[in-house]
Each structure stands twice: as structure tokens, then as C-alpha cells.
Amino acid sequence: MRDNVAAAKAALSHLDIEGNDAAIRAKSRDFFWYSPVLKDRLDHVVADFVASPKNEGEVIEILKTCYAHDVPVTTRGAGTGNYGQAMPLAGGCVMHLRHMAAVKEVHPGRVIVEPGCLLKDLDAACKEHSGQEIRMFSSTWATATIGGFIAGGSGGVGSCTWGSLRDLGNIIRLRVVTMEEEPRVLEFRGEELARVSHAYGTNGIITEIEMPLAPAYEWVEMFLDVGDFMDAARFAEELANEDGILIKLATVFEAPVAFDYFQRVKPYVSEGSHLIGLMVAPQSMDGFLTFLARRPGVKLIYRHDDHDWARSPGPVFEYSWNHTTLRALKVDPSITYLQVRYGFPKHLDLIEKMQAEFSPEVLQHLEVLKENGKVMFAGLSLVKFTTEERLDEIIRIHEEAGAMIFNPHRYTLEEGGRQSVDDRQLVFKREADPKGLLNPGKMIAWDDPDWSYDRMYAYPKMQAAE
Amino acid sequence: MRDNVAAAKAALSHLDIEGNDAAIRAKSRDFFWYSPVLKDRLDHVVADFVASPKNEGEVIEILKTCYAHDVPVTTRGAGTGNYGQAMPLAGGCVMHLRHMAAVKEVHPGRVIVEPGCLLKDLDAACKEHSGQEIRMFSSTWATATIGGFIAGGSGGVGSCTWGSLRDLGNIIRLRVVTMEEEPRVLEFRGEELARVSHAYGTNGIITEIEMPLAPAYEWVEMFLDVGDFMDAARFAEELANEDGILIKLATVFEAPVAFDYFQRVKPYVSEGSHLIGLMVAPQSMDGFLTFLARRPGVKLIYRHDDHDWARSPGPVFEYSWNHTTLRALKVDPSITYLQVRYGFPKHLDLIEKMQAEFSPEVLQHLEVLKENGKVMFAGLSLVKFTTEERLDEIIRIHEEAGAMIFNPHRYTLEEGGRQSVDDRQLVFKREADPKGLLNPGKMIAWDDPDWSYDRMYAYPKMQAAE
């Protein structure tokens, strides 16, 4: 351990500090290993110590102390991100927010919560209080935190109705601590939210969150079997366009994803089954079953509240979004994935084209998403990985066709996003993190403003593999 | 009074029967007088007596007795419809459902209610029970009934989010009594709902309703002033496309509607002010104000929870939908209106074209509406009435341009709708009303199957004006 790091650690020793090597290593890792590219680059990355503050005062103390000693701070929740968001590339301190998990206030339509609260616990508290829940969550609901979701996520289960986290209204307020000689506490609303949401903690630490809520219903979770892939995609799109039918999830899995990777679903489908996963509000089930009956080619094979499956498949949303890749990976370690935007109005054409081009090397996994008031699809396509060159080629062909890629095989904000600098984030980083100590190596615009994006960015100060 | 009518009335004398001429006349009228065309045709129409059943058993008794005596029965709620839906063209019995107003059960996401319940009372009960309210309501919320809304309405405040009543999921279940020798009680769900919803009570009487609910919020009601009409229309469209901002109403009024017809708004606008009326969820106000600040040409002039207006303008929704026409009529009795569908994706082009063609003879009044998952507009244009010929010409020009008209100057289902027979309604009428006694004269397909729609239909058995 370098002297400055040791000094900072010593200065913080009255706090909850993890010094055990195995525990430090465990808490230095997120789900970067979804990507063989990131696995190759980041597997050795480890923090020097882990600090778990109990309140905002301790967050300030950690940031101030690490600032004084020039120690990098990478902040994390549960570490379920899979872009390497929470990997401490330059070592130093990992700040773990698990103790800051209080649900502070619940009101009609909104909640105030600390960042380390699990999505599951947040929903339980809001439901218990007044029959409410958060508008959207990642498929890692049971283990992920709300702060990690906002700092490192973009949307998920519920985005078929409410759009993405970045859309106006989906975050109300963020309280943020800066990393300066004297850290400041700022309250962001409106336009200011874009500075720090989805910024991986590179320019401030979120200590309190105000989010909108939606009513909590006993969502009816279902699987449907469809013989034709594009019929399945159209079914999901048309359902999401039914304004009177309230849904929380509409997912499409190309065959043979269900048969090959969903072990508890497998006995009830065939290799040729394209699967749809849904969450429908109970008061919308009459409307939904009417909609379904108009499409005799689509077969309802499972509903969680009325089925004869020998073993429950568990929550349907735990087959969706990033969980699809996770399940596939467990069966076939060579599987990785892409994140594709199939934008309105060309979404179905693009999907059909990409499916024809790549299946079965790339298998379509589609999530219905609202963007600018229109139903479109996010694709979290499953990719049978061979080489990095082939992966890059697959990405290039998508982009040339007009399907934007958010590359999950990159650890920087820019490469995992729209491959351009977000000036709001950069400008705020200059102000809030003048020494560049917050989650270093994740914002190219900070490290190398003239970067050309012609190849994968490699953070020059990344700790070397041993 | 004809003998058969007198006999039916006598047989029902143990029920709540209105025999007073002035009261009968009052209860024989709806808001048909919005239309100078309907006013000319229907002003003399009056029932012979009014029966107000207290429960489904009495509904059955009235229908059975009137069936036995061949007496027409026209059912009504508050009579706020303005297509003449509740006008008893052939006299006979008006069945008034005001006593059947119980809210029977409230559950998460749904309510079971009797048809005569006022929308206002229904919302109050659902809010009191569990912070819920109905998804959509007519601007006559304070006086209209839920049964009348379903039998004679199509959508309203809330349709910018939830679509129309006819969309799957916006009605869950209807309990219906037939008019046969032995009336039957039927329960309709799914596809069956289309038989009797928006059928004006021509083929069955609704005695119980199950509707979906949405969360009740303290909606923030606002007026905005915009200098350019198309900017105002685009503002409403773009706001409705913000997936993270929850709205219940977005209305656009071309200048000088606000200045000329909205007396309490007039002091705060100019003759050139195009006005927008909004209802936004309180948890979405931060997002909304951010959205607004991006459009410096749009000026927030009123919000109900923070204003310095000398006199409150009252609920903003009471300026919207049919209330716009009502307010204009009170100032200028020569005003009438149209109902236009400006469908996606040509809605803005069509609006611009119609505004250029007709303003100021026709002034645009637009309501944001979701249809098939897309934001579009319903137009309830204000028309300076001159002659029926000119009104027909205005309608024809709209239709030729591609803007569908639901003609509010006609009293039949077909002419006020898509000018075609609804087979589901007709087939069910054959079964449920074999003598054709339910609200006679309102379904052309029943009276004159070969009608050519080349002119306004005139019900041959309508009672003569004296």
C-alpha cells in the first residue's frame, strides 16, 4: 500500500473500514465479468481498503480525508453494474454505501431515500406505507441499491411505461457531496440532475434521493409461447400500445433462449419457442386476456397466480433485462451480450434485419421501452463470443444499419454511452472533483479530451495486473 | 297520454314516478341544445312520465312492464350528453337512474359502482377509501353520472394518458338488463363490453359497473399563455410525449377563445393569447418546470396552488372538453362546435391546415388524446354558426382533408360516430330489445338498415312538434 493510501486509511480508522484482503477483493468487484473484454482488462483490479460510511457526515469525512491524501475514491452500492462502473481502476478507497439505507419519507407519488437502500427494501417500505412502489427498477431488484441504479443504470422493469431514468420527472432531487478540500453539499433538481445521474460517481457522491412513485399492484407475471419471432415482437409492441392496459414489463426472447437457458421454463417450451415475459396490472387482466384472444398464435403457458408448473420459475422480471444474460452465462460461459437501441419508427424493421443477419450467433432479447412517448425496443442481444474483433464487427454492422449500440464492453462513460462527451458532467467534475480522484479512469473527457474513439480506451493509470 | 302509456304508468305507480309536467319536461332534456341543428329538431321532445328505480329489481320491473305495454324507455343519468343521447324521441318512459348511486366496492386499481353515481361522488369515495380515482372523466364531472359517461361518452380528462373508454382495459365489467318479456341480467367483460358501452341505452340497461382506477393526486392545475398557436399545439404534444411527466389534461385554446369566453382568465391574457390548460401530478412538477424553462416563449400565468388572481377561475378541467363550448355559448349563443379526430402522425399538419382554412369562423380547441399508444389530438373546434349548409360544408372540408368528424349535430349512434353500423350493438339489440323499445330512433341500423347516409337521418316515429 502506498504511503498516502495508508495515511488516509489510518486517518479513517475510527469508521467502518474493511481491511481483510478477501473482503476487499470481493467489494472491489462488480458484474464487469458479463463482458469477456472487460474481464480480460479488469479482473485484477482491487481497492486498497473499503470504507462504509454510516451517514452523510462520514461521507464528507472520507472524501475530505482522501482528498487531503490524494487517494482515489470509487463509490459503490451492491456492485451489480456490468459496465465495470464500480471497479476501482486506480485502487485506493472503495466507498460502500450499504449502511446508508434509510427510507426517510414517503408521500403520495414520491419517496426520499438514502442511496444504499436496496430496491427491494425501498419497494417494501413504500408498499407498506401507502401501496406505492418505484416506477422502474433493474432486474437485480433483490440485491441492487437505488443509488447504484441512478448512478450506474438507465432504466429497466417499468421503462415500458415510464421511459428511462434520464427522462424528465423520473428523478426528482439528488443531494450530492463534492470531493474538495472542504466538501460541499448540493441539492440538484431539474436540469442539474443530468450532472450526476448516470455519472458512475465520477463527479460527486449522492447521499439522498427523491424519486417519484407509482401505485404498487399485484402484477400478474406471465410467460407466452409464440411460434414466430416477429409475431412475438409485434405482440409486445401492440400490447405496449394499448393505452388502457397497464403493464410493467414486456420482454421478448428469441428461440431457443428459453429452451436452452431458462431451466425451469424448459419443460414447458420447445426449441422453437419464442418466449414473451410480461407483468400486467391485475385490473388490466380482463383487457389483456381479450387482447390475447385476438391473437390465436400466442399461447399463455404460465401465469404466476394460476399455474400447474412443478417448480415455480420465480419472478418473471428475473428473466428480463440483464438477468437474461446472467442466466445464459450460467449455462454457457461463452455468452456475452450487446445493448442496442431499436428506435421508433424503424424498430421492427431493424430488429428483423439484425435477426436475419446474425441469428443464431446473436440471439434477440428485446425489452419494450418508451422513448419520447413512443413504444420502441431496447435490445440486450445474447452474443456467442468468439473474438474481440468479431464482437467489434457485430457492433459496427448494427451501427451501420442504424441500431445504436451502448457498448457494454467498455468501462468509460463515453464508450458505454453515446460515444460523445457529456459537457454537463465534465463541467461539474471540474468544479466538484478538482483533483480527479472520484472513480478515476471512467470519464475519457477528463483524462484525454482529444481522444478519438478509434479504438478501446485504456486508462493509462490503471493498476497493473500482477 | 296514449292508453298503453297510461297503463304502464299506472302499473308502476308504487315506484318513484314523476307526473308533474314541468319536472317531466326538465327530465326529458339533455344538452342537445349545444347544437343549433339538434335544437331545431328536438326542442319539443318530452317523455310521458319519468320512473326512477331504486335498485336492479325495479329496473327489471319497469322494463318488463313497459315491454308488456309497448312503451318506449329512454334511460338517463344526469342528462349532460350533447348528442341528444337521452332525448326520448318517441315519448313514453324516461328511466332516471339517480337513486342507483352506490359505490359498492373499492379495491386496488378498480371500483364497483352503480350507474347513477356522480363522477364527483365516485372519485370522492375512491379517494377517501384508498387515494384512488377514475382514470378519466368528462368535464361535467361535478354533475354527470358514471353510467351516462359509459353509455354516452367516449373519453375526457385523463384520456391524454389512458386513451378512450372504448380501449381495452378502460372498462372492466358491465352488468346489463335486457328489455324482454322476462328481462335477463347479463354480465359483460372483454369483447362483450362493446355491445353496450357507448350505445346510448339502445340495447340494454347498465345496472352495475366495474372500472379501473388510477392513483388520485393533488393535480396541479395551470394556464399558460403562448404567442403562437402552433407553438402551443407543439408544447402540448411534446409535454404529453414526456414519459416521466404524469399529466391528466393538456388542452389548447386558439386565441381569442380565452380572451373572449373565459371571463375570469380574461384579465390575465390578451386577445392574441393562445391558452394551454394543464393538470400535472405534483411529483412531476419539477420535471414540468424544467420542460417549461426550455421553452421561453411559453408563459405560466396561473397555477391553482400558487397565484395572485383576484378570483379563482375554478377547476381548469371545467374549461376543457365540452365545457369550452359551454363557456363560449354563454357569451355568444351563435357558437356551436365540431368533434374532430386529428390522428397520428398527421395531426399537427392537419391542425395547421384547418386553422389556416377556417380561423376565425372556426377556432381551434384541442385536447391531447392517446390513441394506439400515440399522442394525437381531439379537436372540439368552436364554430360560429351561420347555416346548416355552411356547417355541413365545414365538416365536408375537414373530412376531405383527412380529419375525421364525429358529428355532434346528429342524434343517431351512427351519424355521431363513424357513420357505419356497429354490428356488435345491432346484433345484441335484436336479442335484448326485440320490440325496439329502448331509446328508439337512435340506431339507424335498427330502424332503416338500408339508410344511405346522404343526408341527416330523421326518425320517422319522432313525436311531432305541436
Image (cartoon, coloured by chain):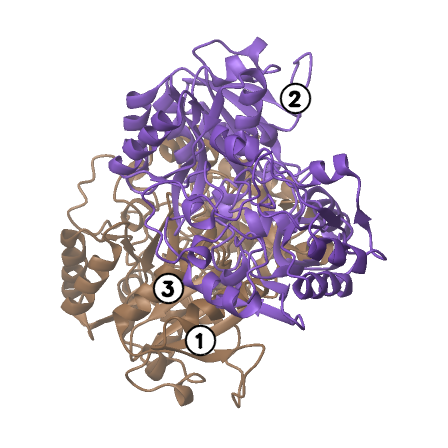
Chain colours: A purple, B brown
Q: Above or below — where is A462 with respect to A255?
A: below
Task: Give the Cα separation between the discs numbered 1 and 3.
Answer: 12 Å
Residue B385's quadrant in the figure? bottom left
Q: Position of residue B411 (x, y in %)?
A: 32, 53
Q: Position of residue B298 (x, y in %)?
A: 37, 76
Q: Which mark is residue A306?
A: 2
Q: Which mark is residue B236?
A: 3
Q: Above or below — where is A131 with respect to A320?
A: below
Mark 3 belongs to which amino acid? Answer: Ala
Q: Position of residue B253 (x, y in %)?
A: 33, 72
To the question of a shared chain for discs 1 and 3, the answer is yes
Out of A192 and B187, give the one closest to the viewer: A192
To the question of a shared chain for discs 3 and 2, the answer is no
Mark 2 belongs to which amino acid? Answer: Asp
Out of B373 and A122, give the one closest to the viewer: A122
- For label 3, the SS is helix
Residue displayed at 54% across by 63% down: B284
Task: Give the Cα separation between the discs numbered 1 and 2.
Answer: 48 Å
Label 2 marks a residue whose chain is A
According to the image, label 1 marks what residue?
A: B223
Out of B110 and B455, give the one closest to the viewer: B110
